[in-house]
Amino acid sequence: MGVKDSHFDEMFDAAGDVRPAYREYYSWLDQQDPKWLARKDAEADDSFRSTGITFNVYGEDEAEERLIPFDMVPRIISASEWRRLTKGIEQRVSALNSFLYDLYHRQEIVRAGRLPERLLRDNDAWLPNMVGFTPPGGIYTHIVGIDLVRTGPNDFFVLEDNARTPSGVSYMLENRETMMTMFPELFQSVGVESVSNYPRKLARSLAACAPAAFDSAGGSKPTVAVLTPGIYNSAYFEHAFLADQMGAELVEGSDLRVVDGRVQMRTTRGYRPIDVLYRRVDDEFLDPLTFNPDSVLGVPGIMDVYRSGGITIANAPGTGVSDDKAIYSFMPEIVEFYTGEKPLLPNVETWRCADPDSLAYVLDNLEELVVKEVHGSGGYGMLIGPTATKKDIKAFRQKLQAKPENYIAQPTLSLSTSPIFTKKGLAPRHLDLRPFVLVSPDGVDITPGGLTRVALKKGSLVVNSSQGGGTKDTWVLKE
Amino acid sequence: MLGRTANSLFWMFRYLERAENMARLLDAGLRIALTRDLEAAEAEWRSVITTAGHREAYDAIHDGYTGIQVWNFILRDKENPSSVREMFGIVRSNARAARNAISGEVWEAVNEGWMQIDAKLARPVSASQISEVVRKIRRIGTLVHGAVTNTMLRNEGFHFARAGTFIERGDSTARILDMKYYLLLPSLNYVGSSLDSGQWEQVLRSVSGERAFLWLNAGQMDASKIIEFLVLDESFPRSLAFCHGALRDHLAALARLHGSEGASNALIRDSGGLLADLKAEAIFEEGLHQFLTNFMARNASIGAAITDDYRFLS
């Protein structure tokens, strides 16, 4: 069974033959009764519902909790492909961390004329409070998600860096659990790298960045807590899941206060200090005394405690500066500046609309391009030229002309496809890949796998779960 | 453990118990209504809605007391902010908030239970469905408690969960008895006489104790036996003495884990002292209504003391 398509397909080559990484899986799949598979597909949904792996959607009266659709055909990456990817990711994440350190210290990259100073000034995520301060362990981005897309056999591109608060890792873990429950025999015949120790590695890498105030006397371990905005947050499931798996407390702003120069949580035994806070609350809401005064999600005074070495905040405040899409367009220069090497993983070609020549090109080619807001995320506020209506394009053109520096544009990539399971059999759909990276003073660790997001609509290029995308289990094959 | 998490566990189990008790109350009402004529059935349903504590809210929108109106009001009506459907929602959101303090199996039992109940109660419950719905609610409680027993660490979270269960259960049994206390009054003059067995069957059924009682008392019903059973019998898991005995043990365990006793430990000791060596006759002398009112007040003050002792709120 071949799938003929002009896009690069992960499972089938142009002749319709199964690619090597998928051979063992495919020969298994080929032997299964389609009716049995369809039953399994329904079972998967039930299992996600029972486990409560849901995300919350706002602005709709009904179904405030939704499932992210799960496709049971795995995305498979060969050992050699993965080796190449990890080298590129490691290089990029190291550069990101050096870049953030530099931005908040001497700004060598600006002095060297390699990055316009304007990009910091115009960047909402830039935090003057962080200037001159070095986070514990020297780490800014403890947890990073690098979004990759593929267009050909050897053509992987970085689409986005998520250094602020990447989410989705719980889906990587639960998708694997679900696959192992549904198809245990499959994991006996195909050698797949395990992802299950991610929470332990996360706990270890967070604990490795204890603040100066942490007292290790008596062999005690740093107290780690996960800060969540609460049960109505769209990613609450993930916050609870990670806290549970790490054996950490799951705290909300109302549980915390500053006592004796430490951030402390209200336990049934009284207030107890927290050493490392894995926060899933944006910078803006972290400290009402420093940032948004109306925030009830954060802790008044936490920034003072942080700066005086009383707590580690992961990821470090101000890290979001590098998620900005205008900064993204400079990533090749950034990687080279800090590592002295050519980037192993290329960027997608990007036009900065702030630049008049680029703007002119973008305005002339709107029908062909993807235009994104510089500070946007989640697939909101973007224009996909080839699928947009004339009216959409006209409206977007006006926005673009009014504030060109707010936008970047990229070619519409021919994203790779991989088959999903449908009632009518396998059907190719576009996808991307978000590997999860942990950074600690001991080095960079990349979990073999990640989150594969897949567009469920035929031809669609938008894979975001907020826009109806689904997920797949992601396999990295053993050597 | 966080004070907020302890609070979530405590209320999660209070509401689970409350929802289950509502199901028991309906079960008893159904049984009696089936065996009586229409007029007597109406009186039964009125008594069910009163015991459930919903009389005022119910009377505001209904004229009479029919089974179908009463059970739909208790189970799901939008006009009833403490319907069983709402209670299950509260159980589940507390379980979500305390997700990392309960085991995966407890969470799944709660989450699946909530999904089933929420779907069942999305539409009015007909006479042909009510028995099944009531059975389902009870079964979910049983599943959750079973998962707790089998999979939860015996740490503070376990004891907060159990404390919530027994505070709520003690309150519920006392409330049910209090609604019917007047039935016992005439019997004071006729000690040993046979009571209105139908009414008493309902009370016993409301606490799932009719079989146990008859078994213990060889089928005989009399006032002091019933009081002994529901108030003082330490082997019956819904009696006041049992609830406060269990509460004492869990609060003692919490004090041990925390290294010191709080106001809640002193209060439960006092309550245990009051119940120990008590005879049914003494309760009648004090006045059953007075006795139950005092019990409920003590029970509530223990709940408040737990909230303070373990920093649930501040």
Image (cartoon, coloured by chain):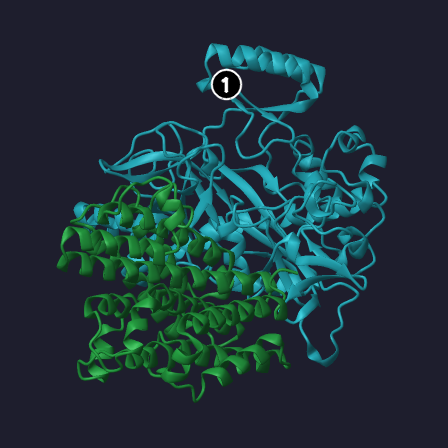
**Quadrant where the C terminus of chain A is found in the figure:** bottom left
Chain painted green: B
Identity of the residue furthest to the bottom in this view? B277
As rendered, which of B146 and B252 lies closer to the eye? B252
Q: Is residue A437 visible?
A: yes
Classify A237 as above or below A380.
Answer: below
Which chain is indicated by disc 1? Answer: A
Residue B120 appears in the rendering: no
**Displayed quadrant of residue B259:** bottom right
Comparing A320 with B47, the one in front is B47
- At numbered mark 1, what does the secondary structure look like: helix, strand or loop? helix
Up the image or down, B179 lies above or below A129; here it is: below
Question: Which chain is tinted cyan?
Answer: A
Quadrant of the rendered structure where residue A131 is?
top right
Which x, y percent locates residue A343?
A: 64, 41
- Which image quarter: residue A221? bottom right
Marks counted in the figure total 1
Is A224 displayed left or right of A110 in the figure?
left
In the picture shown, does residue A335 fall above or below A196? above
Residue at (29%, 46%) from the top-left corner?
A: B72
Residue B255 coordinates in the image, percent (x, y): 59, 80
Residue under the image location 45 percent in, 55 percent down: A173
**For mark 1, what is the residue?**
A385
Residue type indicated by callout 1: Gly
Q: Quadrant of the N terminus of chain A?
A: top left
The one nearer the camera, B267 or B283, is B283
Residue A416 position in % (x across, y down):
42, 35
Q: Residues within 10 Å of mark 1 (few under 14, many from 20)?
A: many
Measured from the top left, where is residue B239 in percent x and y? 36, 76
- Taking the image as shown, residue B74 lies to the left or right of residue A238, namely left
